[in-house]
Image (cartoon, grey):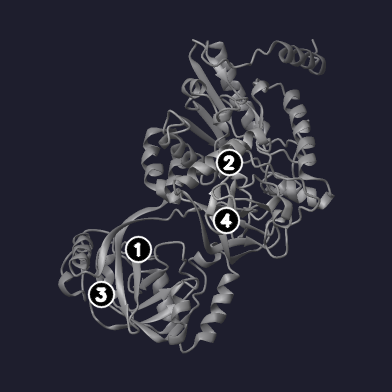
Amino acid sequence: MKYDFAAIEKKWQKRWEETKPYAAVTGDKRPKFYGLIEFPYPSGQGLHVGHPRPFTAMDIVTRKKRMEGYNVLYPIGFDAFGLPTENYAIKNHIHPAIVTKQNIANFTSQLKMLGYGFDWDRCIDTTDPSYYKWTQWIFQQMFKRGLAYKATMPVNWCTSCKCVLANEEVVNGVCERCGSEVIRKEKSQWMLKITAYAQRLLDDLEDVDYIERVKIQQRNWIGRSTGAEITFQTNIGDEVTVYTTRADTLFGTSYMVISPEHPLLKSWQPHIKNWDAVAAYQEEAARKSDFERGELNKEKTGVRLEGIEAINPVTHKPLPLFVSDYVLMGYGTGVVMGVPGHDQRDWEFAKKFGLPIIEVVQGGDVTKEAFVAKDDTAIMVNSGFLNGMTVKEAIPAMKKYVVEQGFGKEKVNFKLRDWVFSRQRYWGEPIPLVNCEKCGWVPVPEEQLPVVLPQVESYEPTDDGESPLSKMTDWVNTTCPCCGGPAKRETDTMPQWAGSSWYFLRYMDPHNDKALASKEALDYWSPVDWYNGGMEHTTLHLLYSRFWHKFLYDIGVVPTKEPYAKRTSHGMILGEGGEKMSKSRGNVVNPN
C-alpha cells in the first residue's frame, strides 16, 4: 500500500491546527516537561536542513513525554533582529520590518509542513514591541544596579558591517557573520558587567546536567586563575602593575611589555624619546584582531620605550620596557613581566631583541612548549630566598613575600571580559535611556516602555560609525524624565543576543502585558527541562542567557538560579565543500 504523505499529512496537520493537541496548559496537575530548541533566525532563503535536524530530535522527545502522561511545553519563535536581515534589506532596498514579516511567514509555512508538535499559540517574535518592551525593561534593571555602563575602549570593528562585534563574534580574526576583516577601534560603548557573575557562572555548572564538552568550553572561556598582582616602580616615578600566576619566577624577569592600547602610554609620551616609532606601532596594532595578536606561533614584534625603565622589585635591577601587540589590554592589567627562561613566547621575544634569559627553575618535568617545570621535583635557582624550594613551595612563598613587602597582593583573575552590548546599527532594540546635560544618563520611565524603533527611510550604516538613528533628530531630541530639560535618546541599539537571552521565559506566558511572565507560569514551568542547541553557541548565547537569568533570579523575578536543567549540543551539518551550511555561503539545502 502506498503511503500518500502529501494528502495524509496535510489532512492531519489541518486537524491539529483546529484541535490544538500540542497546547501546553499552565498549572495542569500532570507532571510538566519543557523541551526547548534554539529558535531560528528567519532569513530570506527559508529553512535549511540544519534546522529540522535538532527540531526533529526534540520533537521525538516531547512526543514520547506526552505519551508518558506529561504536560509538555514545546514552543517555537523567531530571533528576528540583527545584521543578516538589515544587510539583506540594504542590498534589496526593502525595509527590514517588511523583510522580517515575509521571512517569518515563509518559515512558519515550512515548519508547519514538517508537522512538528509546537504550541503555535505561544509563538514569539523578538522584533514585536510587546516582546522587546521586556528586553528593554531587563536592560533598565541592569542599568539601575550598575551592571550596564558606558565606557570608551578598544573594540572589534567589522570593516564591512560597520559595527562593533563582541570578542565571541570574531572568529579567526574575521567577522563571524560576513567574513570581512576586523580591526581595533576606540569607541564609546554600552557594556554589561558579566564579569560580576564570573565565579557563579563557573560554580553553578556543577548543578546542571550539561554534556561535559559544553562545561569544559564554558570553564575555559571564563578562565579563572589564581595568582598575584605585583607593582613595579619606574624611573619616571609612575608604577606599572602586572598579574601573574607564577610569582615564583619574579627573579627571572628580564624585561616588561605593555599593550599598545594601554592608557599609560599617552601620559608617558613626554618621557618616550622615540614616540614616533611607538605611535606608528600602535597604529599598526590597531589593524589586527585579538585573535591574530594572541597567536602563539606569530613572529614577535615590538618597540622599546626609550627613556622609560621599570625596576624589578626583588632584584632592584632596571628592566627595559617594550610595547608589543602580543599583550592584550583585555586580560590582566595590560602589562606583563617577561620571564624568557620559562615561557615559550617570552623566550622568542627575548631572542628577537637580544634580552637576558635567566634560568630560575631547574629539573622536574619540563615541557618543550613552555619551559616551566610542572612537578614537585623542580627546584628554584638564582632566586634569592626561594633557592632550594620546589615550585609548589615557592609560589605561595613569593605571594606571601610580595604582600608583606607591600608591592603586591594575591588576586583571582578571569579571562572573561565584560560584554560589549551596543551596536551602531538600525535593526535592533532601542536602548531605553536618554542623556541629559544636567542629570546624565536617565532611564525612560517604565510606563513609557517600549521605546519603539522608529520608521526610517535610510537604515544604511553611517561612514562616521554612528547609528542611522542618530540622523533622526525628531526622535533623538526629547525631554529628561528627571528635570524636564532637553535630552537626547541613545541612538545605539542592542545586539541580536539581547532578545535570545531570555526568550525561553516569555514562552511560559507570551501574552502577558503586565510582566515578562506571571509568577504562576514561571513557578510552574521553570526551569527548562531539556535544551538542545548548537555547539557553536556554548560561549555566546548559552553563557549570556545564564548571566541574564542569574540577574533576574537575584532581583526576584525568576524562581531558579539556572535557566536550563539539561543541555545537549549538536554539531553542524556541512554543506557543499565541507563548510558550515549557511545562507551567507550559499551552500544550503532546502528541506522542502
Query: Residue 488 occupies which quadrant of the picture?
Result: bottom right
Amino acid type, callout 3: Phe
Camera-side residue of 372 and 407 = 407
Q: Position of residue 365 (x, y in %)?
A: 28, 61
Element on which disc 2 rests: helix
**Residue placed under numbered mark 2 in the picture:** 136
Mark 4 residue element? strand
What residue is disc 3 on?
Answer: 251
Furthest-right residue in this view = 93
Location of the N terminus (image quadrant): top right
Crowding near pointer 1: few (<14 within 10 Å), some, many (20+)? few
- State the CA–CA distance, disc 2 to disc 3: 52 Å
Q: Residues within 10 Å of mark 4 (few under 14, many from 20)?
A: many
Q: According to the image, label 1 marks what residue? A: 367
Sequence-earlier tag: 3 or 1: 3
Query: Badges 3 and 1: C-beta atoms under 8 Å apart?
Result: no
Residue 200 lies, in percent from the top left, at 38, 42
Q: Is residue 235 above or below residue 157?
A: below
The amino acid type of the residue labelled 4 equals: Cys
How far apart, in angstroms, are the residues tagged by discs 2 and 1?
51 Å
Numbered disc in front, either 3 or 4: 4
Which residue type does callout 2 highlight? Gln
Q: How many marks?
A: 4
Q: Of the two numbered discs 4 and 1 on the same chain, state the one appearing first in sequence.
A: 1
Q: Pick whichever of labels 3 and 4 is earlier in the sequence.
A: 3
| Numbered disc in front, either 2 or 3 | 2
